[in-house]
Image (cartoon, rainbow, N blue to C red):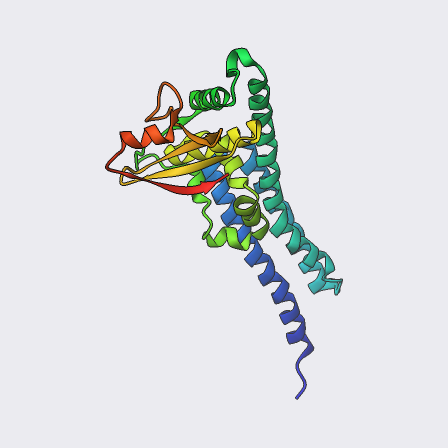
Amino acid sequence: MKINPHIIKYATCILPLLAVIVFLAYAVFLLKHIQIIYGKFHILPLSVFLEITALTILSLFFIFRFFLKKTSLTPVIILVFLLWIIPQLTFISFIEYEYGLVEKNYFDFTKDEKTSGDTKIAKAWNISKKYLDSFSSSQNDIRIPVPVRCLYEDNIVLKMNSFLHIYLFYYQGLEKLTVTDKRGNCSEFARAVAYISNKTLGMQTRIIEISGYNHKIAEVKEDEEWYVLDPLKTTPDSPVLESDYKKIFETYSLKEVHYI
């Protein structure tokens, strides 16, 4: 039984069209996540939108050419791949660019002893205070969502955008985004302060959860002692030794979240 060549032609055309639709869907879902974080009219979502639009139109154009003129499908394959990867790379590049500016600012800040202090602990504390000045806290108000939390490790959209997923969760991209976003609650503040202190001062840092109190804090290590940096809520005046800090919350337990 011979298969009608027209059926083969239609099937060959439908498969790349389905591929365009699938990868377009993931690109659009990623764009929606970017819009949650930056807003619809920020330069990043606008750039990604233009990229997605241009690549989709080109892909459909070459599918149309294939159907009518029997040209090669190679351009379609390349464009579909670009439709998948370019929005991811644009997002990653933007995070890296913005974080680079912030890190340089804090690195310069730590070089000035008059403003940052003459010891590493003093510098780390003043970093936390400086970051607090630019941080917008929602104070755990559930009516004010935290934008960066739309990017979580089990998010199926991010898993399908695997370059971005690997960057965020295996190369500290989420820490960099949190630093530059400057919005959130204690979790985001602790993550940002711990990361900046580690990168600009070379200090070992970690994030601790206070079980039962619904709070997270950043800590830095100096001379085998851990110091709490939480000007956001519980240590407004100075860094506090963890051994002394525990006395403040005797009825709660401190649980290590992760090191940076």
- Residue 170, x across and y down, in percent: 55, 47
Residue shown at 31%/34% (left/top)?
140
- Residue 178, x across and y down, in percent: 48, 35
Residue shown at 49%/52% (left/top)?
157
| Residue 166 visible in image | yes
Q: Is residue 254 left or right of residue 77?
A: left
Residue nearest the viewer, comparing 69 with 105: 105
Q: Looking at the image, how many numbered discs can be counted on the residues?
A: 0
In the image, residue 132 sits, relative to residue 144, either above or below, namely above
Residue shown at 27%/33% (left/top)?
249
Taking the view exactly as shown, the residue that stands out farthest to the bottom is 1
Taking the view exactly as shown, the residue that stands out farthest to the front is 224
- Residue 221, x across and y down, in percent: 47, 31
Residue nearest the viewer, comparing 7 with 105: 105
Residue nearest the viewer, comparing 202 with 47: 202
Q: Is residue 220 left or right of residue 185?
A: right
- Residue 256, x across and y down, in percent: 40, 42
Q: Name the image quarter holding the N terminus.
A: bottom right
| Residue 185 visible in image | no
In the image, residue 199 sits, relative to residue 85, either above or below, namely above
